[in-house]
Image: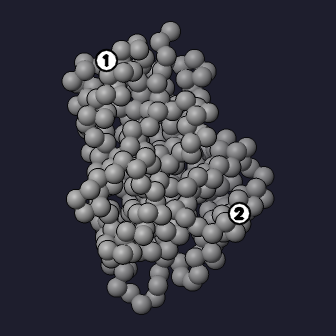
């Protein structure tokens, strides 16, 4: 039986330990600071991105996985006789999936599958880990792709941002720009629906209280969630805030695994510091 190579772009925001544990390969998107491009997760950190953004008073641009890098990786997997399943950030936000399809065509790599996650951050990561577990259970690549694509609409990805300017300048969520000029200091809950970001309920107040209220507001959803795992993903929050969310989730006595990850460079470039989200699969 051919080995299945689970691959994702760097926006899946999985920690190094998870990548190693599940043998997941990563292809980085690119972060562009003025004229210089950096590989996400390899050549620049989120904190360096924030320092640049504060100094320059603008947010970085981001770019898809580079064609040459993707071609090199896929070619190596093909030569090894591996089946390749690639997970990309939502096609509504990036051309990365298209880059991978061009690579598949150039190599005539019939055993390569490209999945549009219709999500971002650990909304992708949840799907990647599920695919790795299904591969471990002996499912074929085609069976895994069918299952993942059938269930991806059950992924619940949302987060609350502290700094609207990053999201507004990034242009990925049109509803945010309108809030930016207001004097109420509103902090919207951003939800991913059909691969796009939309602003939901709006909070105000200190971010630590806003984050806890956001999680408490999800209690009904969380109790109905798939109990296998839940992610707390943040873009640089105080440890005490992260722990308070973790304790709240533990107190539900529902999830088998609570994973905490820090968002990588691309996600951080668009949402800014102080953002936190709780991401999970809805119960089947």
SS at circle 2: helix
Q: State whether residue 149 appears in this view.
A: no
SS at circle 1: loop
Q: Which residue position holds label 2?
A: 243
Circle nearer the N terminus (1, 2): 1
Q: Which residue position holds label 1?
A: 110
Residue sitting nearer the eye, 120 or 59: 59
- Residue 256 to residue 248: above or below: above
- Label 1 or label 2, whichever lies nearer to me, is 2
Q: Which residue is depicted at the point 41% across and 14% down?
A: 80
**Label 1 vs label 2: CA separation?**
45 Å
- Residue 88 to residue 233: above or below: above
- Residue 60 to residue 68: above or below: below
Q: Is 175 left, or right, of 262 in this rendering?
A: left
Q: What percent of the width, then of the height, locates residue 120?
A: 43, 51
Q: Which residue is depicted at the point 41% across and 63% down?
A: 49
Q: Which residue is depicted at the point 54% across and 45% down?
A: 14
In the orientation shown, which residue stands out farthest toward the top?
1
Q: State whether residue 74 appears in this view.
A: yes
Q: Which residue is depicted at the point 55% across and 55% down?
A: 262
Q: What percent of the width, then of the height, locates residue 209?
A: 64, 77
- Cβ–Cβ under 8 Å for marks 1 and 2: no
Q: Residues within 10 Å of mark 2 (few under 14, many from 20)?
A: few
Residue sitting nearer the eye, 180 or 17: 17
């Amino acid at each position: 039986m051919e080995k299945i190579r689970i691959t994702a772009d760097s926006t899946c925001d999985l920690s190094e330990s998870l990548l190693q544990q599940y043998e997941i390969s990563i292809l980085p998107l690119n972060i562009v600071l003025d004229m210089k491009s950096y590989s996400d997760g390899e050549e620049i950190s989120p904190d360096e991105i924030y320092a640049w953004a504060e100094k320059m008073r603008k947010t970085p641009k981001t770019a898809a996985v580079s064609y040459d890098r993707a071609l090199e990786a896929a070619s190596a997997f093909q030569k090894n006789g591996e089946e390749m399943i690639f997970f990309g950030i939502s096609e509504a936000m990036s051309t990365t999936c298209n880059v991978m399809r061009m690579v598949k065509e150039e190599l005539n790599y019939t055993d390569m599958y490209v999945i549009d996650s219709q999500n971002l951050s650990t909304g992708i990561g949840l799907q990647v880990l599920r695919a790795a577990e299904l591969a471990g259970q002996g499912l074929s690549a085609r069976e895994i792709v069918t299952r993942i694509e059938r269930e991806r609409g059950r992924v619940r990805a949302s987060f609350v941002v502290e700094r609207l300017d990053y999201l507004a300048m990034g242009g990925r969520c049109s509803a945010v720009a309108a809030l930016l000029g207001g004097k109420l200091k509103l902090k919207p809950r951003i939800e991913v629906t059909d691969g796009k970001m939309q602003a939901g309920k709006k909070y105000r107040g200190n971010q630590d209280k806003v984050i806890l209220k956001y999680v408490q507001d999800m209690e009904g959803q969380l109790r109905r969630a798939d109990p296998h795992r839940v992610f707390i993903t943040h873009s640089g929050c105080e440890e005490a805030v992260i722990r308070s969310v973790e304790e709240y989730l533990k107190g539900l006595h529902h999830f088998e695994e609570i994973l905490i990850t820090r968002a990588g460079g691309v996600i951080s470039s668009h949402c800014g510091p102080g953002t936190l989200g709780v991401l999970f699969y809805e119960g089947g």
